[in-house]
Image (spheres, grey):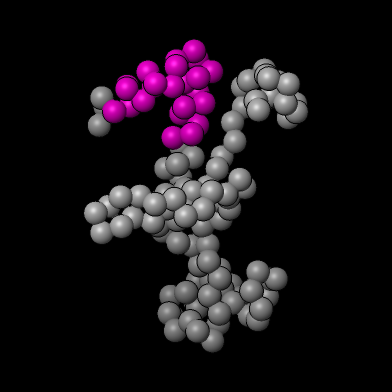
């Protein structure tokens, strides 16, 4: 239920001017049909992955990344940014912000999507 339909009020959401980012894990089959594997209500926006020190033979990572002992994985490791994760998450968040901006300016979502597709 939305906040405007008697749901909880989350910091001004009772006005209907908020959104929730969901994460979807999708797999494509050989015909490029998408299959939904998982829907996350609180997806990570982290773009780094932990690489164990003893498994890392990349000299660039070893010379440019600081060793870490955080609790994400056991043992000493590096946090390496994934270029793919970075690109995908930035693109998705940019799109979400553009939709939110369009809605705040009174542009219906379907009209915004029509405008977006006409530019591509």
Residue 46 belongs to magenta span:
no
Q: Quadrant of the N terminus?
A: top right
As drawn, which residue projects farthest toward the top?
106
Q: Is residue 34 left or right of residue 25?
A: left
Please indicate whether residue 78 sits to the left or right of residue 90 in the image.
right
| Residue 12 in view | no
Observer-nearest of 54 and 16: 16
Q: Quadrant of the C terminus?
A: top left
Q: Nearer the viewer, residue 1 or 10?
A: 1
Q: Is residue 2 above or below residue 69?
A: above
Residue at position x 30%, y 57% in the image: 29
Tell me residue 53's x, y (percent): 55, 82
- The x and y percentages for residue 25 are 47, 53
Percent x, y of residue 47: 51, 57
Residue placed most toward the observer, 8 or 68: 8
Q: Residue at x 55, y 79 (%)?
A: 52
Instruction: Verify whether residue 112 appears in magenta.
Output: yes
The structure residue drawn at horizontal position 43% and vertical position 75%, both measured from the top left corner, is 60
Residue at (47, 27) in percent of width and height = 99
Q: How many marks?
A: 0
Vertical arrangement, residue 66 with respect to residue 47, above or below: below
Residue 41 found in image quarter: top right
Classify residue 118 as left or right of residue 70: left
**Placement of 56 over or under 114, stated as above or below:** below
Q: Is residue 37 above or below residue 70?
A: above
Asked where in the image residue 31 lies, by quadrant, the reply is: bottom left
Q: Give the main secondary structure, helix, strand or loop, of the magenta stretch.
A: helix
The magenta segment is: 95-117
Front-most of 10 and 53? 10
């Amino acid at each position: 239920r939305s906040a405007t339909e008697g749901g909880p009020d989350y910091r001004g959401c009772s006005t209907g001017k908020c959104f929730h980012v969901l994460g979807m894990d999708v797999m494509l089959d050989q015909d490029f049909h998408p299959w939904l594997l998982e829907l996350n209500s609180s997806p990570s926006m982290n773009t780094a992955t932990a690489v164990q020190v003893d498994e890392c033979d990349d000299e660039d990572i070893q010379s440019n990344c600081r060793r870490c002992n955080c609790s994400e994985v056991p043992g000493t490791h590096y946090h390496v940014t994934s270029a793919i994760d970075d690109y995908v998450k930035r693109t998705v968040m940019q799109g979400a912000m553009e939709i939110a901006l369009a809605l705040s300016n009174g542009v219906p979502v379907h009209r915004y999507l029509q405008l977006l597709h006409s530019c591509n």
